[in-house]
C-alpha cells in the first residue's frame, strides 16, 4: 500500500535543504517505489512530503542516501500515513478519494466507487466532472 512520508527537520533552512538535495534528487527519482517529493518551510521547521509504494522502500532510501548526507546535528522527525489513493499524470488509481492538480492548485474531491469508470465512456464523463481533459493514454489500475 502506498504511503505518505512526512518529515520535519527542525533547524533546517532552504539553503541547507538545497545543499543536501543537490545529491539526492537524481537518486530518489531512480529509486524503486518512489512516486513524489516536495518540500516547504513551516513554523515546525523544514517539511518534506514524499509518496512511496511502500514504507520499506522509503526507509531503505533514507538509510542509504539521506541519513549519510544530513548536516551534523540535523535529526529529521519522520511519520507515515497509509494512502487510500494516489493519482499522477501518467498513472491513474481511483478509490474513494482522488487528487488532481488544476492550475497549480491541489484539489481533493470525494468520489463514490464505480466499477463502470473502467470503461472509456464513463471515464470520459468522470474527467468532465473533474474538469480534466480526457486522455486516452491514462491507465486505470
Image (spheres, grey):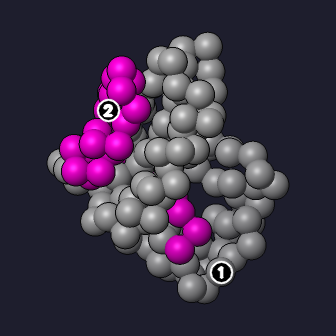
Q: Residues within 10 Å of mark 2 (few under 14, many from 20)?
A: some
Along the horizontal axis of the image, is 134 left or right of 131? left
Residue 25 coordinates in the image, percent (x, y): 48, 58
- What is the spatial separation of the Cα atoms under label 1 and label 2, in whole angstroms? 32 Å
Question: Residue at (77%, 51%) from the top-left corner?
Answer: 104
Horizontally, residue 4 falls left or right of residue 129, namely: left
Q: What kind of element bears circle 2?
A: strand
**Pointer 2 residue:** 80
Circle nearer the viewer, 1 or 2 = 2
Q: Is residue 130 magenta?
A: no
Q: Residue at x 62, y 34 (%)?
A: 14
Residue at 62% across, 42% down = 108
Give the extent of the magenta segment: 61-90
Using the image, tell me which numbered label, if any, was put on residue 55: none
Quarter-wise, where is residue 76 in the image?
A: top left
From the viewer's side, name the closer residue of 101 and 69.
Answer: 69
Residue 122 at what x, y percent from top left? 59, 73
> Residue at the front extreme?
72
Relative vertical location of residue 136 with respect to residue 118 in this rendering, above or below: below
Residue 123 percent location from the top left of the image: 59, 73
Q: Earlier in the sequence, mark 1 or mark 2?
A: 2
Nearest the viewer among 43 and 127 is 43
**Farthest residue in the top direction?**
43
Q: Residue at x 69, y 54 (%)?
A: 101
Q: Is residue 19 visible?
A: yes
Residue annotated with mark 1: 135
Q: Judge from the rendering whether residue 63 lies leftward or rightward of residue 47; answer left or right.
A: left
Amino acid at each position: 500500500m502506498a504511503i505518505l512520508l512526512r518529515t520535519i527537520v527542525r533547524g533546517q533552512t532552504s539553503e541547507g535543504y538545497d545543499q543536501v538535495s543537490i545529491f539526492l534528487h537524481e537518486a530518489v527519482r531512480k529509486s524503486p517505489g518512489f512516486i513524489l517529493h516536495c518540500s516547504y518551510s513551516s513554523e515546525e521547521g523544514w517539511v518534506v512530503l514524499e509518496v512511496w509504494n511502500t514504507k520499506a522502500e522509503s526507509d531503505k532510501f533514507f538509510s542509504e542516501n539521506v541519513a549519510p548526507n544530513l548536516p551534523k546535528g540535523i535529526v529529521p522527525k519522520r511519520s507515515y500515513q497509509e494512502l487510500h489513493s494516489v493519482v499522477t499524470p501518467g498513472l491513474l488509481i481511483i478509490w474513494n478519494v482522488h487528487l488532481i492538480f488544476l492550475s497549480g492548485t491541489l484539489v481533493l474531491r470525494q468520489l463514490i466507487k464505480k466499477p463502470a469508470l473502467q470503461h472509456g465512456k464513463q471515464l470520459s464523463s468522470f474527467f468532465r466532472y473533474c474538469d480534466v481533459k480526457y486522455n486516452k493514454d491514462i491507465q486505470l489500475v
